Image (spheres, rainbow, N blue to C red):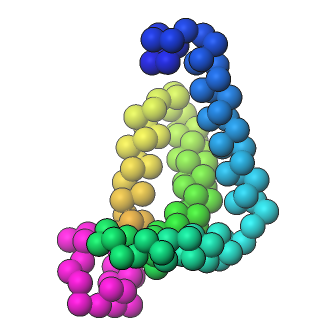
Amino acid sequence: LFTLYVEGPRPALAVVFRFAALILFALVVTETTRASAIQDALVAALRPFEWLPFVSAEKTGLALAITLRSLPRLRLAVQELREAREARGLELSAIRLVVPLIVRILRDARDIADAIDARSWGAGEESAHR
């Protein structure tokens, strides 16, 4: 919307097409490539930058793997919440979908963080989620 307002319809349309192309590319890559191969490629690409204090190739690879694993679960949660709303005869409402979805996402994130802590990932470092 900002590009449409500031630059006009043609540049805004170009932004929409670029964004759509990126989404399509991401879908093609994630559907045709094993998650472990994507994770390994990301870790290998980030290794030269580990001299920077804020770059950890292994942690970034783990974050990517968790994200890729979470996307189907997120899709399933949205479907379950929609079905529950319909079963109760409730009208369509973003709040009735978004709030329980955020609660589920935060609960899953806490469970994942606890599992990572239990496996002593980054032993010696203080947990970031507490």
Could you tell me which residue is drawn at 72 percent across and 72 percent down? 34
Residue 52 image-quadrant placement: bottom left
Is residue 42 something one can see in this rendering? yes
Q: Is residue 17 above or below residue 101?
A: above
Using the rendered image of the protein, determine whether residue 118 is visible from the camera's viewpoint.
no
Query: Is 122 a magenta residue?
Result: yes
Q: Which secondary structure class fits the magenta region best?
A: loop
- Report the magenta residues as a range: 112-130
- Residue drawn where x is 61% and y is 77% of the image: 40
Give coordinates of residue 101: x percent, y percent.
44, 49
On the image, the x and y values in percent for residue 130 come to: 20, 71
Frontmost residue, 78 versus 11: 11
Decide whether residue 68 is among the magenta residues: no
Q: Residue at x 45, y 11 (%)?
A: 6
Occupied quadrant, residue 99: top left
* Closer to the camera in the image, 75 or 50: 50
Question: Residue 45, image x and y in percent?
Answer: 56, 71
Q: Nearer the viewer, residue 8 or 120?
A: 8
